[in-house]
Image (cartoon, rainbow, N blue to C red):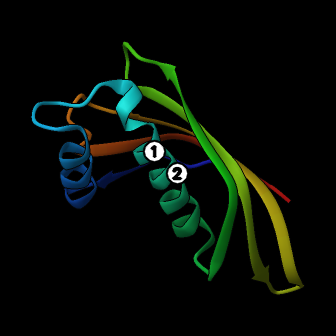
């Protein structure tokens, strides 16, 4: 599966700015937000109740505000319980106000 989408993150931005003080965050300070946004994109793609584990994210390119996030997701499909791994490539601007999913891969 691969997809590209935008998600505005006003509430997430408020939490990030509060956590790191005033001013715009650095790319490194947005890593947890990238992890959460990847989970949101996976959740939307699967469109079923999900449970995440082993989620991590890292800055892939600080200059372009690009992140890579990975993890494991458990869900049920028409054949029963499924455990899959996922990888997201995401970008945002220096405010973290809007996230763009560049690539999403879910492997069962």
Nearer the observer: mark 1 or 2; the answer is: 1
Placement of 1 over or under 62, stated as above or below? below
Q: Are marks 1 and 2 in contact (CB under 8 Å)?
A: no
Badge number at residue 32: 1
Question: Left or right of 28: which side holds 98?
Answer: left
Which residue is at a point 58% across and 60% down the rendered structure image?
42
Q: In front: 106, or 96?
A: 96
Among the 4 quarters of the image, the one containing residue 82: bottom right
Residue 65 picture quarter: top left
Point out residue 90 in the picture as x, y percentages from the top left corner: 47, 37
Query: Which residue is depicted at the point 41% across and 17% down?
Result: 62
- SS class, disc 2: helix
Decide if residue 87 is on the left or right side of residue 63: right
| Residue 1 visible in the snapshot | no
Residue 38 percent location from the top left of the image? 52, 51
The count of marks equals 2
The disc placed on residue 38 is 2
Q: What residue is shown at x 22% (from left), y 60% (from top)? A: 11
Q: Position of residue 48 (x, y in %)?
A: 62, 81
Furthest residue in direction right, as rendered? 79
Please name whichever residue, 3 or 61, is drawn nearer the observer in this view of the structure: 61
Left or right, 20 with respect to 4, comes to left
Q: Residue at x 56, y 68 (%)?
A: 43
Q: Is residue 90 visible?
A: yes
Comparing 58 with 98, the one in front is 58
How crowded pointer 1 is (Cα within 10 Å; few <14, some 14-19, many 20+) is rated as some
Residue 31 spot, x, y in % from top left: 45, 37
């Amino acid at each position: 599966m691969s997809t590209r989408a935008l998600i505005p993150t006003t509430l997430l931005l408020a939490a990030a700015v509060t956590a790191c003080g005033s001013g715009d965050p650095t790319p490194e300070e947005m890593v947890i937000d990238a992890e959460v946004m990847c989970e949101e994109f996976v959740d939307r793609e699967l469109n079923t109740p999900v449970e995440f584990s082993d989620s991590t994210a890292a800055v892939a390119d600080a200059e372009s505000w690009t992140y890579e996030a990975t993890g494991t997701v458990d869900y049920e499909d028409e054949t029963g319980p499924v455990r899959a791994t996922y990888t997201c490539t995401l970008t945002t601007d220096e405010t973290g106000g809007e996230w763009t999913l560049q690539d999403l891969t879910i492997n069962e």
